[in-house]
């Protein structure tokens, strides 16, 4: 099976996961159960989650996943982003949807969905990332909403979710160009015109990552070495959450220390700066000679 076929297979699994998300995300549903259901579906399909299932309610834009013992539920009249990644032997499909539980927020979600569609229509070898950002910006603002300027799409490579090149949701002065044969995630985020159009970090961190290539060059105590070995074997350099680790309590202190000292990277939960609701849609695409193929 070729590399592209592996990416396609991961994309097919991601579509099944999105269908399940549309079915189970509802008012009152436990966020922990949503995450575990979608992650378990990926595993039953013969793959692994490329990162913990992200559930972004209302102003939460990214990086929230259920924590150990999480009792939070989907609130009434909310807007819910579900961002999932599928890793098939390191070949990644990254995709997201927005599920609206308040009809008043449907136009906001639609602006992000149409922006994604318009951006994908324009993708071909050599298109600049700034041009894609311009299309997303024009589409969202033309519908009366505001793009999130400090969240971006990204290139994807094997075992590398964010492989260097970023794809903005606004026009930029300088932009790199998309290349034939490469894989990219396009992900418009939108908020209301009352919003700041940018996200900020909170103190909450539920998703982490190590660099498996460099972690063992650092000075590690015995417990830290054991934890690093476990993380490298289980996740390579892909993001993870502590609820995936059986018996995490015995590593908790070492994990907290490694986060404080920068040996483990934490992804803070990101929220719209003024607390306005956020919508998101995302596809992973393959750039072909005459356009692009949607993989998710």
Image (cartoon, grey):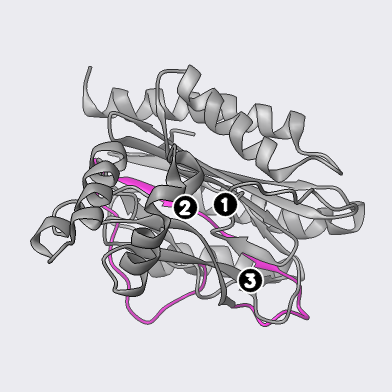
Residue 180 magenta-highlighted = yes
The residue tagged 2 is 186
Relative image position of residue 17 (x, y in whole percent): 58, 29
Q: Which label sits in the foreground, 3 or 1?
A: 3
Residue 8 magenta-highlighted = no
Relative image position of residue 192 (x, y in whole percent): 76, 72
Q: Taking the image as drawn, is residue 150 in sight? A: yes
Whichever of callouts 1 and 2 sits on the residue coming sooner in the sequence is: 1
Q: Nearer the viewer, residue 132 or 104?
A: 104
> Distance from label 3 to label 1 (Cα)?
21 Å
Whichever of callouts 2 and 3 sits on the residue coming sooner in the sequence is: 2
- Number of on-image labels: 3
The residue tagged 3 is 271
Relative image position of residue 284 (x, y in whole percent): 44, 42
- Name the magenta segment's main secondary structure: loop
Question: At numbered mark 1, what does the secondary structure look like: helix, strand or loop?
Answer: helix
Marks 1/2 in contact by CB < 8 Å: the verdict is: yes
Q: Residues within 10 Å of mark 1 (few under 14, many from 20)?
A: many
- State which quarter of the image contains the N terminus: top left
- Residue range in magenta is 169-198
The residue tagged 1 is 116
Residue under the image location 59 percent in, 71 percent down: 148
Q: Nearer the viewer, residue 121 or 149?
A: 149
Image-based side of 208 in relation to 120, left or right? left
Residue under the image location 24 percent in, 38 percent down: 233
Quadrant assignment, res 105: bottom right
């Amino acid at each position: 099976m070729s590399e592209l076929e592996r990416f396609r297979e991961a994309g097919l699994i991601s579509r099944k996961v999105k269908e399940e998300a549309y079915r189970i995300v509802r008012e009152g549903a436990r966020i922990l159960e949503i995450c575990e259901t979608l992650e378990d579906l990926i595993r039953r399909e013969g793959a692994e989650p490329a990162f913990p299932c992200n559930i972004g309610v209302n102003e939460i834009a990214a990086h929230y996943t259920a924590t150990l013992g999480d009792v939070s539920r989907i609130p009434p009249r909310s807007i819910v982003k579900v961002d999932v990644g599928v890793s098939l032997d390191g070949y990644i499909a990254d995709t997201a949807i927005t599920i609206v539980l308040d009809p008043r927020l449907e136009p906001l979600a639609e602006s992000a969905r149409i922006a994604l569609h318009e951006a994908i229509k324009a993708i071909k070898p050599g298109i600049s990332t700034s041009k894609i950002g311009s299309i997303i910006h024009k589409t969202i603002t033309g519908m009366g909403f505001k793009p999130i300027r400090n969240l971006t799409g990204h290139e994807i490579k094997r075992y590398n979710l964010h492989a260097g090149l970023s794809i903005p949701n606004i026009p930029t002065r300088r932009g790199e160009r998309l290349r034939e044969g490469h894989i990219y995630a396009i992900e418009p985020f939108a908020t209301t015109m009352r919003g700041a159009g940018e996200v900020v970090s909170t103190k909450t961190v539920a998703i982490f990552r190590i660099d498996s290539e460099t972690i063992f060059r650092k000075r590690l105590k015995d417990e830290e070495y054991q934890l690093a070995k476990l993380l490298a074997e289980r996740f390579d350099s892909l993001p993870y959450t502590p609820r995936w680790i059986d018996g995490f309590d015995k590593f908790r202190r070492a994990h907290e220390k490694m986060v404080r000292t920068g040996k483990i990277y934490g992804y803070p939960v990101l929220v719209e700066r003024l607390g306005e609701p956020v919508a998101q849609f995302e596809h992973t695409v393959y750039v072909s000679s005459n356009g692009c193929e949607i993989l998710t």
